Amino acid sequence: MKNHFDTPVKLFIQTITQDTDGYPVKTETSSNVWGDVNSVKRTEYYAAETAGHTLSMSVTIPVIDWDSDAVECEVEGKRYRIVRPYQTSLDYIELQLERIRG
């Protein structure tokens, strides 16, 4: 449903620090936003394929909810890598997502 923002989306931010022994420690924080789920446009899909990514879906969220440090998100219980975020207008950001297998 276009511009209803009725799908919950969880954005994940990952920070890597060092523990007392100098080993890397990954810390993850998240924030919940609302978005619109869309199919991937053909040109976006093939452009990502040439870069080695397989896009699964596109999610549009309000720009005010976007954190540029977000690297992954969860939509409908599935985890996705944010391949390409881009601003479609002053108010919205579209996230091109690749499903994380595992």
Image (spheres, rainbow, N blue to C red):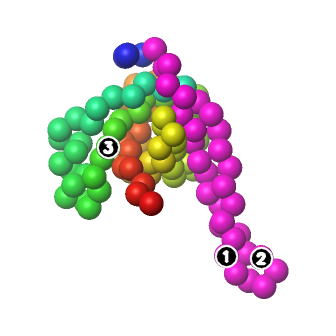
Q: Position of residue 88 (x, y in %)?
A: 37, 29
Choose between 101 and 38: the one closer to the eye.
101
Q: CA distance from mark 1 to mark 3?
A: 30 Å
Location of mark 2 (residue): 19
Residue located 41% across and 39% down the image = 95
Residue at 42 percent of width and 16 percent of height = 3
Amino acid type at circle 3 is Ser
Is residue 63 among the parts visible in the rendering? no
Secondary structure found at label 2: loop
Position above or below: 20 against 50 = below
Rendering coords of residue 102 (x, y %): 44, 60
Q: Amino acid at mark 2?
A: Asp
Q: Does residue 31 appear left or right of residue 22 in this picture? A: left
What residue is shown with label 1?
Answer: 24
- Describe residue 61's horizontal placement relative to residue 65 as left or right: left
Q: Position of residue 5 (x, y in %)?
A: 49, 19
Which three-letter amino acid code belongs to the residue tagged 1?
A: Pro
